[in-house]
Structures are given as C-alpha cells and as structure tokens.
Image (cartoon, rainbow, N blue to C red):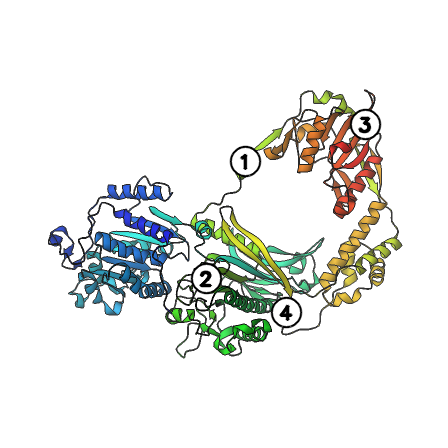
Amino acid sequence: MKLQFDSQQQHQLDAIQAAVELFDGQPLSRGNYEVNLDALASGMLSECGYGNQLAIDEESILANVQRIQARNGLSAAETLDGMHFSIEMETGTGKTYVYLRTIMELQRKYGFTKFIIVVPSVAIREGVLKNLQLTREHFLALYENQPYDYHVYDSKRISSLRQFAHADKLQIMVINIDAFNKKENNIIHKENDRLSGRKPIEFIQATRPIVIIDEPQNMESTQAKVALDSLDPLCTLRYSATHRNLYNLLYRLDPVKAYDWKLVKRIEVDSVLDDPDFNQPYIRLDSVETTNGKLVAKLLIDVQKSGGPERKLVSISKTGTDLHQLSGEREQYRGFVVDQIDSATKTVTFANGRHIQCGQEFGGRTDELMRAQIRETVKEHLEKELRIQELLPEGRRLKVLSLFFIDKVAHYADEDGKIRRWFVEAYRELREKPRYAALQLPDENLVHNGYFATDSRGKAKDTKGNTKADDDAYELIMRDKERLLSRSEPLRFIFSHSALREGWDNPNVFQICTLNETRSELKKRQEIGRGLRLPVDETGNRVFDSSINRLTVIANESYEDFAAGLQREIEEECGVTFSRERLDNKRQRKQLRLVSKWRSNQDFLALWERIKQRTHYRVEYESEALIRQAGDAIRQMPPITAPRIRTQRHSIEVTERGVVTQMLAAREQRVEPEITGPVAVPDLIGYLQRETELTRRTIADILIQSGRLADAFVNPQQFLDQTAREIRAAMTRLMVAGVKYERINGSEYEMLLFEQNEISSYLSRAIDVKHSLYNAVECDSEVEKQFALELDAREDVSFFLKLPRWFKVDTPLGTYNPDWAVVKRESGEEAKLYLVAETKATLEADQLRDSENLKITCGQAHFRALEDVQFKKVSHAEQI
C-alpha cells in the first residue's frame, strides 16, 4: 500500500504561504539550469561551499511579517524578534509535510538550496526521514522533477558535509541537536584532516542555511540556542504544536481550530474506574519533596468522615506519624507508622516493614483495572472493525490499530508476562463470540507484537526512551509503518514502552491504552498525539467520515479528570484562552443598601418583634420504634455488592468554551482478582456505635431486625456505610416527628446585625424592589425571582424581607434558614397578617429531598412556638 498525499489542504497551504511570503521582495529564482555569473562576487560562492543569499533587509522582513500576521488574525509585531519565525500547528495536522513542502516552495520561488532540519531526538529524526522517503514521489510530481538530496548528518561520514556545501541543487540535511551542542565533545566543532584541516561546522556556516527546527520547545536552553546560532543560519523556521516562545509568529492552527475544522480525529474516553475497596488499607505516595526546609511526603489514604470513608491527601513531615490516627482510627491502618522518608529514592517505609515508592499504591486493585482496560481496548477495537465493515465498501476499507503503552516491558515481553496473558485471554474470549464471526479474525499469535529496546542478548528491557537501544526499536517500527497499514498484515495490537512516546504516529491508530502500575507521567496531549491523525484506507487516501474518525483513549481515570488535564495542558502549552460564557459580566457585583428610615418602618418593626426570638429544641422517641424503623429501612437497602470495575464512555470536544464532555455509555463488570482470600469483617457494632452514638444493645437489635447481616461478608465497608446512613436517617425522622421548640428567655436576634452584615450580590441575581428593607433582594433561583417581583407588585403586601443568611433555626439536621418574612393587609386597613414563607418549585413532599422536608417541618415547629406569626410553604406569591 502506498500513502497518497493531498496537495490542496487549505490549512497546510496557508501555513506554507506564511513562510514563503516572509521573503517577499527577494529576487526570484532564475530556474534550475541557469548559471549566476555574479555568484562569486555576491558572496554566494566561497571556498567552503555554495550558500543561500538574502537580498532584502530586516525592515522589509518586518513589513512582510506584519502583513502575514494581519492576514492570519495574529497580533502584529512592532519590532522583529531576530530572524526566528514560528509556525504553530496542532499535532496530527501535517506539520512535517508543511515544512518539507515549504522547503520545496522556497527553492522553487527564490532559489534557496541549503536547508537543515534540526530535531531534538532520534525518534523525531527517524520520523522526519520516513516522511522524506514517503513524500519524495509526491514532491517530484508536484515540482516538475526538481532534483534534491537528503541525508542524515553522521559524524562517522564527516566528508559528506563537503558534498552538502558544494552542491548547487537542493540539499536537505537532518541533524540531531546533540550532534553539535557541545563544542568540547562534538566532532563537528573539531578540525579534521579529511576536510583540509577545517572544522566540519565551517562548511555548514558557509551555506547560510535556512534552519527548520522541529519541536523547538525542546531546544530553548542557553546551550541549545548557542548551538543553533553556531550554524550561522540565514533564519530559523520553528514548527511545533506547543511552542515555549513564539518568535515572530506567522501562522497558528491551535487545537480549537483543528477540532472545529475536523482536521483530526474526535476523542472519546473510556474511563475504567475502580469502586474504592474500603475494606483494605489504601495508600498511594504522590510525592516526596522538600518544603520550607522540611522533607514532606504526601500520601493518599482513606480517612473516616461522618458519612463514611473518603480518599484524602495527607502530608507527613516526621517519622513516627501513625496513619491509624490520621485516618480517623480506621482499623485497616493499624501498624502503619512512618519509619523513614527517603528523599533519594522517593520512598516511605513503615514500621510494619511495608514500603512504598513515589507513584506506587497498594490496597488498590491495579491488576484488575489493567485487565479490564485490556479487555475494553480489545472489545472497542473489534467494534471499530465491525463498524468499518458496515460503513465502507470492499476496496476502500481501512486497517484498525490499537496501541498499548506499558511501564514494565517484562509484563508483556516475557512469555508468562501478565499483560501478554491478559491480552491473549481477552482476545480469545471475544474472538469466539458470534458477533465478531464476520471479521474472520486471525489467530492470537499473529495479531500482537511489541516494539521494545533490547539488550546485547536481544532481550527486551525497560528504558527511558533516550538510549541507542530505543533508537533501534524506533527504527524498526518506522520501517513497519506502511506494513502496519496493510489489511493483509494481521498485526493489529502494538505494545510499546518508551520508544513510541514521541515522533511516531500512525494514522490508523484508533485505540490508545496506557497500562501503568504507577501514575503515568505521559501528558494527555502526548498520549492522544499518537493517534490524532486522520486515517487512510487501503488505497492510501484519507478518510473524512466523522462517524469513523474517533480516537478512543482507554484510561484508568475519570473523564472529568482527563478532560480537565487536557484543557490545562492546552492552556499552558498553546497559550489558548477559552471563553467563559460572559464570565466577566457575572463577576460584576452589586451592594444591597438598607433603605432610608428602615429603623422606623412600622411594618418591619412589628414583623421583627414577632420573629426575632431564638428557641431551642428537645426530641423524644422510643428505642423500640427506632429498632423497628431502622431495621425495616436496612432490610430494604439496595443489594450489597463486591467492588466492581466501572466503564464510562464520554466524548471529548475541544471548543472555544474549553474541553467539554458528553456521556455516551456506562456499564459495570465484575473482575475477580487472581488471588483471593477471606474477607476480613471488622467490628460491626463498634463501628456503628461510633457513627450513631447508640448503645451496643440497640445496634445489635437493629441488625438482627434487618435480616441483612450476611451482607457484611460481601463488602463489609459498603454494608457498614449504608447501614449507618439508614440508622441515622431513621433517628432523624423520629427526632423531627417528636421535636418540641421552646423560647429562650432573653435570647433574640438583634436589629444591629442588619447593619453589621453587608450583602452584595451578582447583578444577575439582584432584583430591585420598593417594599423591602433593602433597595434590592438577592434571589437564588428563578422561582425566588418571580416570587419577589410578584410580592413587590401586590397592593395588599405592605412589606416583605428576604431573611438574611445569619437568621437561622437550630434543628436535629443542622441549621435551617427560612426564605421570606411577609406583612400582608387583611380585609381591614389595620388588620395585618405576619408570616414566614418557604419558596419551593413544587409543594409535593415526595419531590423534595428528605432533608428539605425535615428541615421545613422543624421550621414549622419553631414558628409555632412564637406568637402571632404563621409559617407557610409556597411556590407562587398568589399562595400568600
């Protein structure tokens, strides 16, 4: 199969034009076979070679830059930021094609012949060489067989620089920054007998090359800048999706445009999540850092809260710290006392002999999650193949690839590696399903392979991605790039360690799964970048069907976290500022002012006299009623289940408002651990006693009454948490039913509080009124807004007040803040009705939360204890 290139993609043409127009005013090329007899006198020829010549001054360059920026909607530069020029293009939109074709255009139009492509790594270098190979036939056809040479700089073949320098036809050299950034070590800076005693770099300098910098954000150090200057470039053209510094920006294709113009695949996230198993001690070491002179370890542990355990980050700065105490005395952490914090190894050791390294966790179900991710990836892959078979005709179908990143090579490379084993199990299981019979899937031994660095004996090994062994692995998959696109090649599932984290991408990668025992250091944009490019069919042409062009990331984090991380990276790396839907207007606030003579308003004074009194409450209920009601509630609880793996699929869209999500599907699966042991059941009665403050006898009777004790062996913590909630709910209902309020003599709210507590509100929530204590009232909902407007318009309502937040009634469920106090004229001119109103969108008790109903019940009991004031729940002002 041969890749086909579209020469008419507008975003690429715009980026090419931006770079070419930079030299407007430069004398045009004289043609491929014309000889410039003035070359020697004008400085184009020298003893060391034949070079580029710039005939226009910097003022003309600046004018060109400003014109280009204006056309592309960019801020105009006031001065020229050196002879460095930036082109920003989102990953997957053809950045390498653009700068290679820009080279061709600059040679055709202006006759520039010497170009150097500087790359930050061998991985990216190999990607550039592969693109030069793939595009050669395309460019020869497009540029009338214009001859050109390309090669990689090799310090062992230093004499090739003489050919590069003296050739008068187009020359492209690809070089790694490490080959010339150290004058004391690099051969390129040392005099060489094979070059007549000259330094190799002198032949480059003589050509005044136009330097293309691929991923320049990796070459911003002082050392790298000095090295780039040492090439004596005519100018640098800098191409990246994530510039650190934007020198004279000429063109920008940011992520929002790329997604909006459908130049890259849409993104879906399959979040494979573990229901926390609070029955085991969970610990994850997030970091070990020195803060204010102290060594601080940050651990994620389960901490006991009133509603049950929650995962919380705690900081530890000294040995002897007991996680049992930090967790709220959870029995699972007994014995986990910090013995040592080691900054060198980023390790925390405990007195019980356990230790944990930064990024590691124990107590979680990492293996089960990874297993579920693998199965989900294989299933999604097969579903994609089915969809393509249904949507595309024979002869125009495309190959589907899935890419797995793993953090330990042995887990796949070894014959008994767990990742290899889990993959084979999942593939075999799904392959046998009748649903996928039409795919005629190959044997499992043919569909997967790993691309890893190897040692001298050929054994795969873990590396950091920057070794010679990594280079070999990278070159292997680059050679296989086209083979992987062929439908006749059964290989579908690719496993990699470090070598594919940058530089390599394949347009037909549709699933990316990252499998880590520790937290992944791979950035979201780096991760999805391996599969963003639009796919190609078996004829080598791009496919633009949006129902097919979806990249699925199988992640072990929530879609909210994935989307937030992706948006944060886009904002930090691309300088994109997402619009916030008129957020600035929402930030405009208004100060609510007390009306003049408010202290003498007779309606307010009469109302306040009736409602200012504080009360206290007492409750009465019988233990037998609690045992009966709590036992019945526990019996009717939802089933207790063992912790499950949950999968949620969400689409991810990059818009002007930010990275937004939409739910597509959700399901659960039970993944049994490979090694299971007996479930440790904690002290049920002791735990419930701490949570409810009831006697052990009462709790025991409730549990017996419920008939659900066997559930404690299925998932002890879930059983305890749900049981504690039901007991507390039953207690609350009984207390509210028997609540009695009494006035507290000498205790009341002071009018002075109105002056001491100023009220400010968002403009969008403040309603101007005439018959209240303030010139406006703050409304928390549309129901309240309408209620306030209707009250203010009624002739029979002489005064109303939105009760301030400090006006509270104590209840068994916490404090309650009523909504409104109203003064209404009755039939006689002097007759007044004083009431407190609670506004709700509905008056149906079963449509309100239990806590709302119970607090309203307590509010009614409180106001019954006061004199001459009513309490009413309403949804409209007409009900007053």
Q: Residue 211: x and y, percent?
A: 28, 55
Quadrant of the frame with the C terminus: top right
Distance from the alpha carbon under mark 2 to that under mark 1: 39 Å
Tell me the distance, in whole angstroms, between the alpha carbons under discs 3 and 4.
Answer: 64 Å
User: Front-most of 466 and 787?
Assistant: 787
Q: Is residue 657 above or below residue 599?
A: below
Left or right of 553 on screen, residue 756: right
Q: Residue at x 63, y 62 (%)?
A: 667
Of tags 4 and 2, the one toward the viewer is 2
Q: Secondary structure at mark 1?
A: helix
Badge number at residue 531: 2
Report the amino acid beneath label 2. Gly
SS class, disc 2: loop
Q: Earlier in the sequence, mark 1 or mark 3?
A: 1
The amino acid at mark 3 is Leu
Gap between marks 1 and 3 measured at Cα: 40 Å
Residue 852, horizontal then vertical, whole percent:
75, 44
Please name which of the two marks, 2 or 1, marks the residue nearer to the observer: 2
Q: Element type at marker 3?
A: strand
- Residue 675, given in percent of the width and then of the height, sits at 64, 74
Q: Earlier in the sequence, mark 4 or mark 2?
A: 2
Of discs 2 and 3, which sits in the foreground? Answer: 2
Q: Which residue matches tag 3? A: 833
User: Which residue is under mark 4?
Assistant: 671
Out of 281 and 51, give the one closest to the viewer: 51
Sequence-first tag of 2 and 1: 2
